[in-house]
Amino acid sequence: MQRNIRIFFEKTGRAKYISHLDMTRCWTRTFNRAGLPMWYTEGFNPHLYMTFALPLSLGFEGLCESFDARLIADIPLDEVKERLNQVLPTGLQISRVADQKMNAREIKWADYELCLECENPKSVHEKLTEFLNRDSIVVEKRTKKGVKDMELNGLYTVLESSFDETSVLLKLRLATGVETNVNPMLLLENSPVYAEILQTSVRRTAVLTADLNNFE
Amino acid sequence: MIPKKLERNLLKVQKPGRYIGGEPGSVHKDKTKVDERIAFCFPDMYEVGMSHLGMKILYSLYNSRENFWCERVFAPDVDMEDVMRSEGILLYGLESFDPIKDFDFIAFTLQYEMSYTGVLNMLDLAGLPVRASERKELSPIVIAGGPCACNPEPLTAFVDLFLIGEGEEVNLEITELHLKAKNEGWSKEQYLHEAAKIPGVYVPSLYDVTYHEDGTIKAVTPIYDDIPEKITKRIIVDMDKVFYPDKFVVPFVEPVHDRAMVEVLRGCIRGCRFCQAGFIYRPFREKRAETIDKCGKALCDSTGYNEISLTSLSTSDLSEIEPLLDKMLTWSQERKINLSLPSLRVDNFSEALLEKIAKVRKSGLTFAPEGGTQRIRDVINKNVSEEEIMNTCRTAFEGGYTNVKLYFMMGLPTETDDDIRGIAVLAQKIVDMFYAMPNRPKGKGVNVSISCACFVPKPFTPFQFEPQDTMEEFDRKQKLLRSSITTRKVTLSCHDASTSFVEEILAKGDRRLCDVVELAWKKGSRLDGWSEHLDIERWTGSMKELGLDAAFYANRRRAYDEIEPWEHLDYGVSKEFLIRENKLAHADTTTPNCKQKCSACAANKLLKGEKCVAAKYQDFLRENGKG
Ligand code: SF4
């Protein structure tokens, strides 16, 4: 008996400092602690099979992260969720365990909430708004093949922006997926206000398909 | 919640996961509901400290008491230290993020001499004076234990109280006394004086040291008559009943040893004369297979590890090793859990045993003959013959292994150039044997890698009287060994002699070295266990500046009747025994192991009347119909 499952989880608080590499070890042990029999790869160095749809950068929080794994026993998916949640460290929590409805290639967008702490939120907000409204933002992007220029216009939408006494708050929708991937920090680092930001908190709040449905 | 100041800087440092705690298995309590808070400090980085079994045991032990809360603290890496110093972040406990200077105890484990300046650096990062005499309050009390506490003198100016021997009982006793002291409003002096009466507790400020004109020690005298002249180490008599954690903290960031560990025995029957652990942990006491198996299973369940190691100084000496492996393999294989046995010995590595571990372990094999010739192996009492080494390698090759790693030492007492060349000769013989085997693993070459350490004579061993080779001599011997190797099938790596030199000075040093440790730290020494951070100049320069002669500590033969800096500590083995063993070494004569015959080392007195190894083993043989 084998069943491909997709696990949706939240990564918040202290857990955002767990690197992607460390996450796979962490999940393997979580399955073991939960006593859930999972499929291991064959070969010289077998490991628990796991594929992440969209790795999260170190230091980001995420509310709808997901990865795929393969269950090798007939256990109801709600029970899988319960058993995992009982043994997960603080900051990691399963929201849903389901069958794999879509292909990870269908992911096209992701929404982010950014909280930018700064000395003068009003002026930072003004400058940032001006920047995000430009017709063209060309940035250098480092890829495996070297540095190349990238036009960001069309690859992001500002969903919301505001400020309070301490910070600028920004909700962005960014092109995401196998072909194009825009990290919110790329946009920020190229903005004129980057040097004024004391601390950036980033939270990924949604992972979406081309027609803006949740990735399932 | 992570404090703001810390949070703002975490992404600026390498591997921030080391500084945030919150791992599965970590213990969180309500600080308003606990009486005593303990910061358990490992004076090296997270990856090293989180691999350490003693820390896991004591962390769980403290936290098993409802009113005690023990947190973990590690030395920050250099980038994090910079951030902490520039942002004014004080060293904090990983569980609560509270500054440890407000705790009741700051407890260090001393695993190796090169971490001593790390102790000072951590106290300084905590915002405390490094010198014990400048910390006047009842809290925090700075304590230290671990193997290096067997000669704690070079740290006596900084640590308030040392725990001698095994900590499972005494750690709790001094914590309870501290609670009483707080409730009754004692001064720090009053507390230390009372604590010094507890067996296994050494309060260095309560002992005076006087010296002869030649710099050797004249006497170590307690300043009160109600504290002992000699401090005897504590041990746990019944290993089957000792506290053992059923949970470990499972790190996010990968430590050096990332696995569950179950302690199978304490002490060692062997009596290899160079090995400090072999003497200071005497007598040998083992757990029953059933206890170990239960513990191991519980740990795998609670941690989710895919690997478990059976930990001890010499796991194959466990009387019930084969039944234990049988028991453990029944559940571990099915759950894809690897069993690993890190300390196997060459001589009793039976075929049946190899077959059992071959089922689960596929990496290379390591052996430690330690000496290149039979003569030098007799001197160091490493009772393993060339035939046994060859047989073990053959068995390994037949089992499909093509890499063997052999550990040796140079600078051993009575060593000649023939003994050094003998290392290369032995490695060559192993290579030749491989190619002479008709049934050798096909299509693969053999690789014999040799790792050669510089010998550091240590306290409480029969070699404590011996001088260490000078750096020049080590250098010459390393060149000699390198030139004696004539095949590419043998690879050699030699340890850095200068590290061993500093280790020796600290290992056999007296109180006057406290100033050296402090000065070396001020010059920037910390994390010296990492070769990229070690600058030997800081140490040699400090010695010179303070007018101390390094050779006096490291390269001098000590007379049998000289009072050693650690002689007021009693680890069970008597000095008479060490002298006897030293003389036997110089006569190239071996001593049988404890199971074969008791050599009257005197450690049996620690068992409070219980039978020691030799007698117990006779009982075991009778019970199993082999006697
Ligand atoms: S008293 Fe005898 S049996 Fe016991 S540890 Fe010492 S030498 Fe070994």
Image (cartoon, coloured by chain):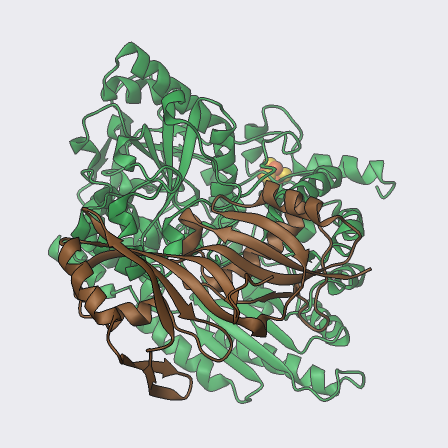
Q: Which chain is green?
A: B
> Is any part of residue A80 visible from this angle?
yes
Rendered location of residue B569, percent (x, y): 39, 34
Query: B53 and B95: which one is in front?
Result: B95
Specify the quadrant that holds the C terminus of chain A. Answer: bottom right
Query: A86 and B439: which one is in front?
Result: A86
Q: Is residue A17 left or right of residue B5?
A: right
Residue drawn 22% across the image and 38% down it: B157
Q: Is residue B332 above or below residue B218?
A: below
Specify the quadrant that holds the N terminus of chain A. Answer: bottom right
Query: B290 and B209: which one is in front?
Result: B290
Q: Single out the residue that lies furthest toward the top.
A: B184
Rendered location of residue A170, percent (x, y): 30, 58
Quarter location, residue B244 = top right
Q: Is residue A209 left or right of residue B185?
A: right
Q: Is residue A104 above or below residue B575?
A: below
Q: Is residue B253 left or right of residue B524?
A: right
Residue drawn 43% across the image and 81% down it: B480
Q: Is residue B386 left or right of residue B74?
A: right
Q: Is residue B135 above or below residue A48?
A: above
Rendered location of residue A180, percent (x, y): 45, 78
Q: Quadrant of ligand 1?
A: top right
> Is any part of residue B591 visible from this angle?
no
Q: Is residue B309 above or below residue B407?
A: above
Rendered location of residue B11, percent (x, y): 31, 59
What colour do you see for chain A? brown
Mark count = 0
Quarter location, residue B240 = top right
